[in-house]
């Protein structure tokens, strides 16, 4: 770190990524701050700095301070971590110790020793506090230690799944035999074997992925399952919207034996909303068939954006829908939650393959909503928008949400 960077951090004060501490604190106090930063996006702990940003300097020699920091990392943070350590002179004889913690720490959740207990910490603004149960679940999911779509849904049963869609999926999509829906025992075993159900307290219950994909009424058990779609006349949000829809139901459609859609799934509902609120060009081809072209946005780019939002959103963020907003000059899709661990916007642009909802992703791939290559973002969204109207889509991660913006 350069002295100018240190000066800027001191001038800006404490934040969600910067903490000021004296170096005569208890190791548990330091561990609490480090664990909280590791569980969010990393950052810096500046030792020898008062809460108001005044530099009092290290009270230990630089080598002793480093030894003390590393001991705190080994003994009071779990799993242990080795941060980047450096010291910088400031205002003559005073020295600031800088602990830099990585933005992509892979072993979340990090816990701090507090007495005899190990506690998961999170950073909220300038404060480090105990994580809630939901926040801790998101951290386990981010590290790949927990698959939320494989988590059981208490209170649900086989009867809460749509047998027609399940038969449709196994017989027509997967091309395999399956028992008649009336044979509950055989279906229960089949769904347990394919991760759509699990055994809990002696009874079989559907997994979250099964309810989202095939549930009769997913929102009865999972209030975060759905989309809110709004079309505005102008370029800003307004109470007088042209169209508002709350989209509910299972993700996948119901097909006939002739591959015609009998009932729309959530993806098709979202596409229908966008279609009826955007301009279309239509013509009759030489064979006498009607052809339609989306004038404002390329169909594949919109579909890929919607599918990604549904497939990869963080379903541990409760009571929050995916949002689709159509404005006069753009389309925005907001997916709740941060990107999965190790995923960045730049990696997405290059076709990085990673997911937090593996079961949902695999089923959507069976339905051909998703490609196996992981190149949907660079090929369908980025290249698709460039070829359609020469614009670059915005991919933005901020706070607890991910935004994709397509320009008309």
Image (cartoon, rainbow, N blue to C red):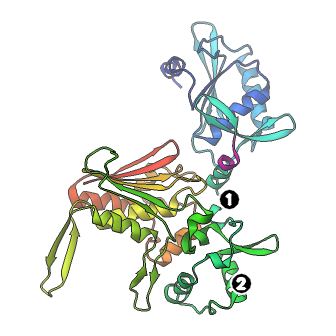
Q: Residue pushed farthest front?
A: 240
Please name whichever residue, 303 or 380, is drawn nearer the observer in this view of the structure.
303
Residue 90, horizontal then vertical, whole percent: 58, 12
The stretch of residues the image draws in magenta is: 131-136
Q: What x and y, as percent, mark residue 41?
A: 57, 40
Quadrant where the C terminus sits is bottom left
Q: Is residue 338 left or right of residue 406?
A: right
Vertical relation: 367 (above or below) 25:
below
Is residue 380 something one can see in this rendering? Answer: no
Label number found at residue 189 = 2
Q: Secondary structure at mark 1?
A: loop
The answer to if 134 sits in the magenta stretch is yes
Tell me which residue sits at (48%, 74%) in the image. 252
Q: Is residue 10 above or below residue 341?
A: above
Where is mark 1, residue-wise?
146
- Please tell me which of labels 2 and 1 falls first in the chain: 1
Q: Secondary structure at mark 2?
A: helix
Report the quarter where the N terminus lies. top right
Across and down, in percent, residue 2 comes to 51, 22
Indicate the position of residue 256 as horizontal and vertical percent values: 43, 88
22 sits to left or right of 346: right
At a point 60% along the width and 72% down the height, the residue shown is 210
Say if 357 sits above or below 86 in the image: below
Residue 200: which disc?
none
- Badge 2 crowding class, 10 Å Cα cut-off, few under 14, some 14 to 19, many 20 or more, is some
Q: Is residue 170 left or right of residue 113?
A: left
The main secondary structure of the magenta stretch is helix
Separation (CA) of disc 2 from disc 1: 23 Å
Residue visible at 29% across and 55% down in the picture: 242
* Classed neighbour count for the residue bearing mark 1: other residues with Cα under 10 Å, few (<14), some (14–19), many (≥20): some
């Amino acid at each position: 770190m350069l002295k100018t960077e240190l000066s800027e951090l001191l001038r800006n004060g404490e934040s969600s990524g910067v903490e000021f501490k004296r170096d005569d604190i208890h190791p548990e106090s330091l561990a609490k701050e480090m664990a909280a930063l590791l569980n969010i996006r990393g950052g810096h702990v500046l030792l020898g700095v008062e809460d108001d940003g005044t530099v009092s300097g290290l009270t230990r020699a630089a080598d002793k301070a480093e030894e003390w920091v590393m001991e705190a990392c080994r003994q009071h943070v779990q799993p242990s971590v080795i941060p980047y350590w450096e010291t910088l002179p400031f205002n003559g004889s005073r020295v600031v110790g800088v602990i830099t913690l990585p933005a992509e720490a892979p072993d979340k959740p990090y816990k701090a020793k507090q007495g005899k207990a190990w506690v998961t910490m999170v950073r909220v603004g300038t404060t480090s506090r105990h994580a809630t149960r939901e926040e801790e679940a998101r951290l386990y999911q981010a590290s790949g230690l927990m698959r939320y779509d494989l988590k059981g849904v208490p209170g649900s049963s086989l009867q809460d799944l749509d047998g027609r869609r399940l038969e449709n999926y196994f017989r027509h999509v997967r091309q395999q035999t399956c028992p008649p829906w009336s044979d509950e025992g055989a279906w229960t075993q089949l769904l347990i074997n394919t991760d759509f159900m699990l055994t809990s307290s002696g009874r079989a219950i559907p997994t979250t992925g099964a309810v989202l994909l095939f549930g009769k009424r997913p929102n009865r058990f999972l209030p975060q399952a759905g989309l809110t779609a709004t079309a505005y006349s102008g370029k800003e949000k307004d109470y007088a919207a042209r169209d508002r829809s709350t989209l509910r139901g299972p993700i996948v459609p119901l097909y006939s034996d002739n591959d015609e859609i009998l009932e729309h799934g959530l993806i098709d509902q979202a596409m229908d909303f966008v279609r009826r609120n955007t301009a279309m060009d239509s013509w009759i081809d030489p064979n006498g068939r009607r052809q339609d072209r989306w004038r404002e946005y390329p169909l594949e780019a919109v579909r890929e954006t919607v599918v990604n939002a549904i497939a990869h959103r963080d379903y541990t963020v409760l009571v929050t829908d995916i949002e689709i907003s159509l404005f006069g000059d753009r389309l925005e899709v907001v997916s709740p939650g941060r990107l999965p661990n190790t995923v960045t916007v730049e990696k997405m642009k290059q076709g990085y393959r990673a997911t937090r909802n593996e079961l949902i992703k695999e089923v959507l791939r069976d339905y051909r909503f998703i490609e196996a290559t992981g190149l949907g973002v660079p090929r369908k969204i980025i290249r698709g928008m460039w070829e359609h109207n020469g614009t670059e889509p915005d991919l933005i991660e901020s706070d607890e949400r991910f935004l994709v913006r397509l320009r008309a």
